[in-house]
């Protein structure tokens, strides 16, 4: 069973950048489809980005497409989310998730393992 730990969140001004990391341990990282999700206070957990076990098939929610980039390093067992041109509406707790299938896609229920999240706050 894989354990996931997110890091890299923080407070940033609108227009700024952050890079989130998700370190995986206890499983074979390269066997999991991976995704990033976010949850703002009082809202559902929403899809942000996903990638296949090989790092291909990057997909994004349209609210972040062109600003965020998902990537993974299967040697370092780490998933990344580079976030540029941040907006106040990007403020949320960001979670990484692992799916036992090659590609989890955008559906929360497809994912089998979750980290505890990292807070991202974007000030206007």
Image: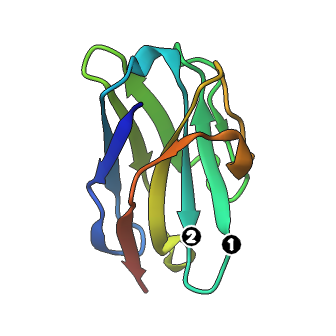
Q: Is residue 4 visible?
A: yes
Q: Residue 117: x and y, percent?
A: 39, 61
Q: Secondary structure at mark 1?
A: loop
Check residue 114 in the rendering and tell me which mark sits there, or answer none. Answer: none
Mark 2 surroundings: few (<14), some (14-19) or many (≥20) residues within 10 A: some
User: Which residue is situated farthest in the front direction here?
Assistant: 1
Residue drawn at the location 71% of the way across and 36% of the way down: 105
Residue drawn at the location 38% of the way across and 59% of the way down: 116
Which quarter of the picture shows residue 111?
A: top right
The mark tally for this picture is 2
Which quarter of the picture shows residue 123?
A: bottom left
Residue drawn at the location 30% of the way across and 27% of the way down: 26
Identify which residue, 15 or 111, lies in the foreground: 111
Q: Residue 66: x and y, percent?
A: 60, 46
Label 2 and label 1: CA atoms lie apart by 6 Å
Looking at the image, residue 26 lies above or below residue 36? above
Looking at the image, residue 17 lies above or below residue 73? below
Q: Are circles 2 and 1 on residues that touch, CB within 8 Å?
A: yes
Quadrant location, the C terminus: bottom left
Mark 1 surroundings: few (<14), some (14-19) or many (≥20) residues within 10 A: few
Residue drawn at the location 47% of the way across and 55% of the way down: 95
Looking at the image, residue 90 lies above or below residue 20? below
Q: Residue 17: x and y, percent?
A: 35, 58
Q: Earlier in the sequence, mark 2 or mark 1?
A: 2
Looking at the image, residue 9 lies above or below residue 33? below
Check residue 39 in the rendering and tell me which mark sits there, or answer none. Answer: 2
Q: Secondary structure at mark 2?
A: strand
Q: Is residue 85 visible?
A: no
Quadrant location, the N terminus: top left
According to the picture, the residue beneath numbered tag 1 turns out to be 44
């Amino acid at each position: 069973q894989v354990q996931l730990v997110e890091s890299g969140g923080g407070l940033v001004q609108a227009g700024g950048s952050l890079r989130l990391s998700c370190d995986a341990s206890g499983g074979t990282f390269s066997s999991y489809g991976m995704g990033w999700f976010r949850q703002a206070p009082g809202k559902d957990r929403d899809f942000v980005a996903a990638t296949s076990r090989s790092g291909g098939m990057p997909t994004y929610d349209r609210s972040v497409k062109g600003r965020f980039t998902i990537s993974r390093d299967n040697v370092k067992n780490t998933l990344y989310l580079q976030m540029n041109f941040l907006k106040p509406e990007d403020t949320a707790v960001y979670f990484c998730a692992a799916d036992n299938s090659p590609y989890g896609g955008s559906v929360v229920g497809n994912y089998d393992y979750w980290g505890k999240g990292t807070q991202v706050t974007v000030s206007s």
